[in-house]
């Protein structure tokens, strides 16, 4: 178990494009929230869920934090996670990513020590909600939140922060199809995730699809 990184799961509960609370939609035999919590809890000694200030309470054994600053999206959730974590780093993930891969997360954590940010680069795009962030990011995140600039990608161009991109070639060695970065935002995304999960179960002879 990793002790110097806290797993932070963003579960705001807005789900505007889905039309239903994504956290409680099932993929396989678990809800999206359960899938992500279970993976992170196998990796990190400390795991927290961050929800919006106006979100419905969650019944979960994992500690739940409400956003310290309201209505700031993922950047606000990151701020809350960095501010509240007792560790020098956090691993940030979103609960609508049903196929996060424990081995890829561990790989990213393993290369964190000389940098402030470690994140995947997939399909020509950085993946800021599947990333490791150091406490050194906190002041930059706070300044962005206070200014109303809520794009996580802004952190990547901040000269004071050292960034390590995990390339597609590196990712493919662990997660060949990059399923770690699949987000479930719409009903069609949910249908795809359920189909992929069913395929995994068939490939494994009916074994659970969650990756440890």
Image: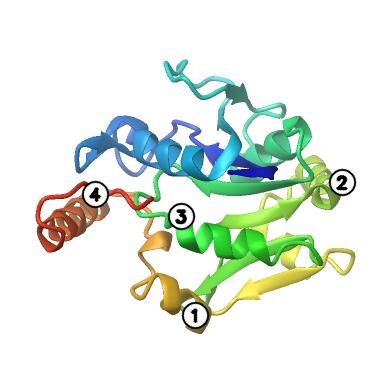
Q: Residue at x 57, y 22 (%)?
A: 63
Residue occupying image coordinates x 38% and y 35%: 33
N-terminal label among 3 and 4:
3
Q: Nearer the viewer, residue 122 or 61?
A: 61
Q: Residues within 10 Å of mark 4 (few under 14, many from 20)?
A: many
Residue 160 position within the rendered picture, expressed as x and y whole percent measured from the top left: 89, 64
The residue at the point 24 percent across, 54 percent down is 193
Horizontal and vertical percent position of residue 69: 71, 29
Q: Secondary structure at mark 2?
A: helix
Tell me, yes or no, whether the two marked residues, 1 and 2, touch with CB atoms within 8 Å. Answer: no
Residue furthest toward the bottom?
A: 169
Residue 184 is left or right of residue 166, and the answer is left
How many C-alpha atoms fall within 10 Å of the one at disc 1: few (<14), some, or many (≥20)? some
Residues marked 3 and 4 touching at CB (< 8 Å): no
> Which of the two labelled residues, at mark 1 and mark 4, occupies the earlier sequence position?
1
Mark toward the viewer: 3 or 2: 3
Looking at the image, is 126 positioned above or below residue 128? below
Q: Which residue is mark 3?
A: 102
Q: Nearer the viewer, mark 1 or mark 3?
A: 3
How far across and down, in percent of the image, does residue 76 sit?
67, 39
Question: Which residue lies under the disc numbered 4?
Answer: 190
Q: Quadrant of the N terminus?
A: top right
- For residue 168, the mark is 1
**Element type at mark 1:** helix
């Amino acid at each position: 178990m990793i002790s110097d990184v806290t797993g932070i799961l963003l579960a705001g509960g807005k789900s505007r494009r889905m039309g239903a609370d994504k956290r409680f939609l099932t993929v396989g035999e678990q809800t999206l929230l359960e899938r992500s919590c279970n993976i992170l809890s196998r990796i990190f000694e400390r795991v927290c869920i961050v929800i919006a200030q106006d979100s419905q309470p969650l019944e979960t054994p994992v500690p739940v934090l409400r956003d310290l600053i309201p209505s700031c999206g993922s950047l606000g959730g990151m701020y809350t996670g960095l501010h509240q974590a007792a560790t020098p780093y956090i691993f940030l993930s979103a609960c609508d990513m049903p196929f996060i891969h424990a081995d890829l997360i561990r790989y990213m954590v393993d290369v964190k020590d000389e940098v402030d940010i470690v994140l995947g680069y997939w399909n020509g795009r950085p993946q800021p909600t599947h990333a490791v962030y150091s406490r050194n990011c906190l002041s930059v995140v706070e300044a962005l939140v206070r200014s109303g600039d809520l794009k996580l990608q802004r952190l990547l161009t901040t000269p004071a922060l050292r960034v390590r991109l995990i390339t597609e070639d590196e990712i493919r060695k662990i997660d060949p199809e990059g399923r770690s970065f699949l987000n479930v935002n719409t009903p069609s995304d949910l249908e795809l995730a359920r189909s992929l999960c069913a395929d995994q179960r068939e490939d494994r002879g009916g074994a659970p699809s969650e990756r440890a």
